[in-house]
Image (cartoon, rainbow, N blue to C red):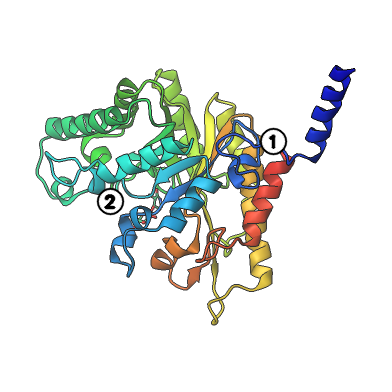
Amino acid sequence: MRKTVAVLATLSFLAIAPPPAQAHGGHDYSLRNAGPRDLRIGSAVAGGGHHVDQPYPDPFPNDKPYRKVLAREFSSLSPENQMKWEFIHPERHRYNFGPADDIVKFAQRNGQVVRGHTLLWHSQNPAWLNEGTFTKAELRQILKSHILTVVGHYRGKIHQWDVANEILDGNGAYRQENIFIRELGPGIVADAFRWAHQADPRAQLFLNDYGVDWPGAKVDAYEALAKELLAARVPLHGFASQAHLSMRYGAPDQLGAVLQRFDDLGLKTAITELDVRMDLPESGVPTAEQLQTQARYYKTVLDACLSVDDCNSFTVWGATDKYSWVPVFFPAEGAATIMWEDFTRKPAYFTLRDTLRAAR
Ligand code: XIL
């Protein structure tokens, strides 16, 4: 009898209790806990890059409300600039790990993983590298030692590395602006993956690029490259679309099919830098219709990720318009993220959360 009462008491408690807290601090209604458990929801962590010229202090270390949003909403963080060569390796014989270390520590405290970005890229390289004169052997050694040092420094702490970033152009040719590819040839890509794997055997190693949201020459070239690397037993684990989108060009309704081609090769896939920019009206404030269209684009990308088996990471490039790179790089376009400057949420945020919930 007493037992029965106890059971009933337990049951009635369950009936009135709020839904059980999800993992990581019980942020029940945040993006990070809305969706399937094996899908990480990420954001870029603002700092460095274009922020240096803006009239505010470096965002991540200084903006407490912003840090709260990052902790509450996301289960993955991507340093926006803090692991790029110019930032983390400013002089030939000096590394600057402090700011990226702070992000990694913050992530660990908050039950988040980190995406490392990036190791082999044509942009945001330090002057000492761009303007130095090196023999081919020296340049190869510089890349090798950078990758071993940086990936080794974060060994065991990085979920996924964007090893090769934007290495192909719109026609699918190797980008000659990339100093390592130009000087050492495209074979250096395989070496970069091998070195990264050597330094952190557990990190998932990715190819990452924009302009791969629709089928075409660039996607064909990445598919061929992925096959070639896999056939040579290079430790390539994933293919990612950055997904920097503009409402000028239509929603990426074939992205799921693109991701499926890489999933079919046995690779993981990811969305790594999603934002959806729009032409702002004169008022600077998007119309209700624009916000609905933007929400639909965000949903199209999330649906694409959800439609393939191994898309395990979905990251937006900036949680808030307050720190978005878009107005700085694309004149007349803006409002590209899922939150306003005061962190209130746009329709795109709610659409993402509803879509994640429905996919649980
Ligand atoms: C951008 C950053 O958001 C800016 O702060 C910086 O000034 C320039 O780079 N593709 C990438 C990202 O892989 O690293 C870029 O980030 C956006 C395009």
Q: Quadrant of the N terminus?
A: top right
Location of residue 127 in the rendering, given as x and y in whole percent from the top left corner: 16, 51
**Residue sticking out furthest to the bottom:** 282
**Apparent side of residue 6 relative to residue 135 in the rendered image (left or right):** right
What residue is at 29 percent from the left and 25 percent from the top?
Answer: 195
Q: Which residue is mark 2?
A: 124
Does the beta carbon at disc 2 come under 8 Å from ligand 1? yes
Q: Which residue is mark 1?
A: 20
In the rendered image of this protein, does residue 201 appear above or below residue 87?
above
**Apparent side of residue 122 relative to residue 129 in the rendered image (left or right):** right
What residue is at 43 percent from the left and 71 percent from the top?
Answer: 331
In the rendered image of this protein, does residue 138 appear above or below residue 54?
above
Amino acid beneath label 2: Gln
Amino acid beneath label 1: Pro
What residue is at 20 percent from the left and 49 percent from the top?
Answer: 126
Label 1 vs label 2, nearer the camera: 1
Q: How busy is the neighbourhood of tag 1: few (under 14 within 10 Å), some, or many (20 plus)?
A: few
- Name the secondary structure under disc 2: loop
Q: How many marks?
A: 2
Q: Quadrant of the C terminus?
A: top right
Residue closer to the observer: 335 or 156: 156
Location of residue 48 in the rendering, given as x and y in whole percent from the top left corner: 31, 55
Q: Is residue 111 visible?
A: yes
